[in-house]
Amino acid sequence: MNCTKCKTKAVIGLPRHNAAFCKGCFNGFVHDQVARAIKSEKMCGKEDRILVAVSGGKDSLALWDILLKLGYRADALYVNLGIGTYSEQSHAKVTKFAEAVAAPLGATLHLHTIEQEAGAGIKELAQLIHRPTCSTCGTIKRYQFNHVAIEQHYDVMATGHNLDDEAARLLGNVLHWQEEYLDKQGPALPASVEGFAKKVKPLYRLSERELAAYAVLNRIDYIVEECPMAKGSKVLLYKEVLNRLETESPGTKQMFYWGFLEKQSKKQLTAATMTEKDRAVLHPCTSCSQPTTAEVCSYCKMMARAKTVVPR
Ligand code: SF4
Ligand SMILES: [Zn+2]
Ligand SMILES: [Zn+2]
C-alpha cells in the first residue's frame, strides 16, 4: 500500500477517505483537518489564548500537540479525579507531555486536584453526596474548566472530542429525542453569557482510530485505559454499534454527524439567538458568580454538601 499523496510506503489506510498515507502526509492530513475545523466553525484565531482540557488520553494530548504545532497559543488544564492508579498514571502522562513538548513551545499546564478541594476522590465524594459518579465528575470538570478560563482570561476552551465521540453522543440524543441537547451539539458553542467562555471541539473531523495513529506515530505517550468509571456506559455501546456500521460501510459516522451539522447550520441557530435564550434564564450564582439557572450553582451546592459529609 503506497501513500496516495507522495507514493512512498504508506503507514495507515483511511477507508472513509479512500486514501492511504505515509507518516509525513498523514500528519499533514491531521493538521489540515483541524485547521479546516477551526476555520469553518470560526473557532479561534492565532492571537486567541486557548485552554485545552487534557485527561492524559490520546485525544486531548493530540489536540494540545496539534494546536501548538499549528502555531496556536494553547495552554491546558488537567483535573486529577483521585481514581487510584488510573489518575496517578494519567497525571504522570500529562505532566510528561507538558514538560517535554508543551513547555519548550511556551505553553503552561494548570492542575486541579479534586481531593485537595473536596477532601475526597471523585468516587468517594459521589457516594457521600449520593450522586452518580459521572454526573459529579461532569459538574466538577465543567466548572473548573470554565473557572480557569474566565479567571485567567482565556478566549476559548477546547476539548478533545472526536468524530466517534460526537457521533455516539448524537446517536444517544436522537434515540432519546433530547432536542435541547441536539441544539447544543455543534463543534463551537459561543460564549453565551458573561461568565461562560466559548467552547470548541477542533477534532470533530477526525476519528478515534486516526487520533490513536497520530499519537503513536508522533510518540505521544498517553494512557490507553479508559477511566474505570466508564465501564458499562451507554456511550461505549453506541460507539460499538457505530464501529460495526463503519466496518460494513466506511464513512457512516462522518455522514451521520456531518450531515447533522449541515442540517443544523440550515436552521441558522446563530450565536445571537442562543445568547438571548440563555440570557433569559441564566444569572450569577450567589456564591461563586458563575452563570446558573438556580440561585446557587450545582457546583457550589455540591461543595457545600461535601463540606458537611466528607470527613476531614
Ligand atoms: S467516565 Fe470517568 S472521567 Fe468520564 S465522567 Fe465518568 S468519572 Fe469522569
Ligand atoms: Zn506521503
Ligand atoms: Zn456557584
Image (spheres, helix red, strand yellow):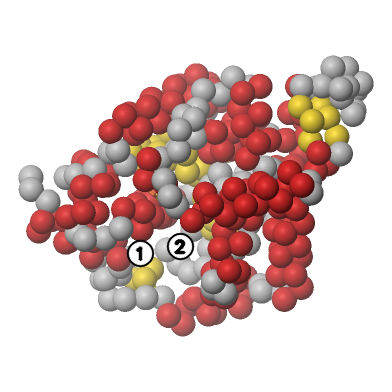
Vertical side of 221 occupied by 192: above or below:
below
- Residue at disc 1, CB closer than 8 Å to ligand 3: yes
Disc 2 residue type (three-letter)? Phe
User: Mark 2 highlights which residue?
Assistant: 196
Residue at 26% x, 60% y: name it: 131
Query: Can residue 200 be seen by looking at this rendering?
Result: no
User: Mark 1 highlights which residue?
Assistant: 290
Residue 12, horizontal then vertical, whole percent: 76, 27
Residue 124, horizontal then vertical, whole percent: 21, 47
Front-most of 252 and 34? Answer: 252
Front-most of 92 and 289? Answer: 92
Q: Are marks 1 and 2 in contact (CB under 8 Å)?
A: yes
Front-most of 5 and 84? Answer: 84
Residue at 63% x, 40% y: name it: 208
> For numbered disc 1, what is the local secondary structure?
loop
Q: CA distance from mark 1 to mark 2?
A: 7 Å
Q: Quadrant of residue 120?
A: top left
Front-most of 94 and 272? Answer: 94
Vertical side of 157 occupied by 94: above or below:
above
